[in-house]
């Protein structure tokens, strides 16, 4: 009997490439923030608001973008939104004032909002259940490592071109991805010429998740305790995490008196460890679930461990002024942060089923409301406290701890539609 083809892994490859591009485009502004602030005369409250404009748009457009993927499929949605956000990445380099920059970053965030929900939708159609948590681990590892290399990449690019032209170059990469993806990808695996009968049989149980599922059961979604807690825990993981991709380079330059080049090298560590956390979680998730006796308990154990450890490491980072220990402890908090990511996104696929794009979008919406709130809150907190980074980090440690309280009551595997069938 012929072995199943491995065309489905091409979907993971495209997802990894897009994840890296999306993080390069969103993280680059954090490394460029000091020079942008200097050139355009922005204070910390204004720069925090510019960071927050991205997070607000990202949050507002999550559900519409995820729903659109459920309805018409990821092929058209991902192609369009990648072209959109790449255009506004390039335009970032040509802004001249606070409002022009804030509006451009808002529109950039509106495009990026659909990325991960629609990649999750693609996974729900192209991957059997047994491969999903590992695939999410690989995806988020790539995303975080893309963010990790961005500070160093930006510094290198700045040696050749101005910050304005750097954003133009970064935007051009997305256009290349969009063209290749649209040519290769199919919403229904059965329509792809490289998928053989054996692989199609492997995917038979998930083919129903393809497209045409725009009739989302909003009542079930809003009445689900697991959905509300999934939203809450993702807010708690995202609020501190946005520090790593917004304020961290400024923190290193001001609190530890590092140069932009030195700061870039140290800023890479937390995001590198973010990716390592995703990778480790994806690799051990099956064994943890086997040891715990179920996938549900395995996911809860991994997520609770991640939240508690992240809170502890950030709290410990407040006890030292030593650069190396301080950055290492913040990095370990980032590692712990991403132990929660594969369980969260895999749960979206299992709870959502054919509506995985919408459920993933709703969860990511809450995460990016935190992405709006955290940098803006940080900017105002720093202004009110005379630049007290320690208070800012202490608040983030508390938010991490609140995430621990959410997971024990989440059912991360039962589909929404199963509850409807039980009620009938």
Image (spheres, grey):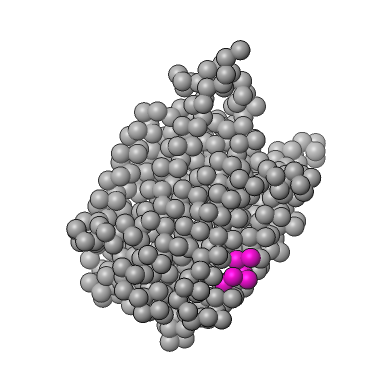
Residue 99 x/y as whole percent: 30, 67
Relative to the observer, which residue lies in front, 43 or 253?
A: 253
Percent coordinates x, y for residue 312 in the rendering: 63, 71
Tell me, yes or no, whether the highlighted magenta stretch contains residue 310: yes
Dominant secondary-structure state across the stretch colored magenta: helix
In percent of width and height, residue 16 lies at 45, 42
Q: Is residue 26 above or below residue 286?
A: below
Task: Please provide the residue range marked out in magenta.
Answer: 309-314
Left or right: 286, with 278 as reference point: right
* Left or right position of 157 against 54: left
* The one of 424 and 300 positioned closer to us in this rendering: 300
For image coordinates 41% across by 80% down, the residue present is 255
Residue occupying the point 66% across, 56% down:
303
Q: Is residue 100 left or right of residue 291?
A: left
Image quarter of residue 397? bottom right
Q: Work out which quarter of the rendered image holds the C terminus and state it.
A: top right
Q: Residue at x 80, y 40 (%)?
A: 423
């Amino acid at each position: 009997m012929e072995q199943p083809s491995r065309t489905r892994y091409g979907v993971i490859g495209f997802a990894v490439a897009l994840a890296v591009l999306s993080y390069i485009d969103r993280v680059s502004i954090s490394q460029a923030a000091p020079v942008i602030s200097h050139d355009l005369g922005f204070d910390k409250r204004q720069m925090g608001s510019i960071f927050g404009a991205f997070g607000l748009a990202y949050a507002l457009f999550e559900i519409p973008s995820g729903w659109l993927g459920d309805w018409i499929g990821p092929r058209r949605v991902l192609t369009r939104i990648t072209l959109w956000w790449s255009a506004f990445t390039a335009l970032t380099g040509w802004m001249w004032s606070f409002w022009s920059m804030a509006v451009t970053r808002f529109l950039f965030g509106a495009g990026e909002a659909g990325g991960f929900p629609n990649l999750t939708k693609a996974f729900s159609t192209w991957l059997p259940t047994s491969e999903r948590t590992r695939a999410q681990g690989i995806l988020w590892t790539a995303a975080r490592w893309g963010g990790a290399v961005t500070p160093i990449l930006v510094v290198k690019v700045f040696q050749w071109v101005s910050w304005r032209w750097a954003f133009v170059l970064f935007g051009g990469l997305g256009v290349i991805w969009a063209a290749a993806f649209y040519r290769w990808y199919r919403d229904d695996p059965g329509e792809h010429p490289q998928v053989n009968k054996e692989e199609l049989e492997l995917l038979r149980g998930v083919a129903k998740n393809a497209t045409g599922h725009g009739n989302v059961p909003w009542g079930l979604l809003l009445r689900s305790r697991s959905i509300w807690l999934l939203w809450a825990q993702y807010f708690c993981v995202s609020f501190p995490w946005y520090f790593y991709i917004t304020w961290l380079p400024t923190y290193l330059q001001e609190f530890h008196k590092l140069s932009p080049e030195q700061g870039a090298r140290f800023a890479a560590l937390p995001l590198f460890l973010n990716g390592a956390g995703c990778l480790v979680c994806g690799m051990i998730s099956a064994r943890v679930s086997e040891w715990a006796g179920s996938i549900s308990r395995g996911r809860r154990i991994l997520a609770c461990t991640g939240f508690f450890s992240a809170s502890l490491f950030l709290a410990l980072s407040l006890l030292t002024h030593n650069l190396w220990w301080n950055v290492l402890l913040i990095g370990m908090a980032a590692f712990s942060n991403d132990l929660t990511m594969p369980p969260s996104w895999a749960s979206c696929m299992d709870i959502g089923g054919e509506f995985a794009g919408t459920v993933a979008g709703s969860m990511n919406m809450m995460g990016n409301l935190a992405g709006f709130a955290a940098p803006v809150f940080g900017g105002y907190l720093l202004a009110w406290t005379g630049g007290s980074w320690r208070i800012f980090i202490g608040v983030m440690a508390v938010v991490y701890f609140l995430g621990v309280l959410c997971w024990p009551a989440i059912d991360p595997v039962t589909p929404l539609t199963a509850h409807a069938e039980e009620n009938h």
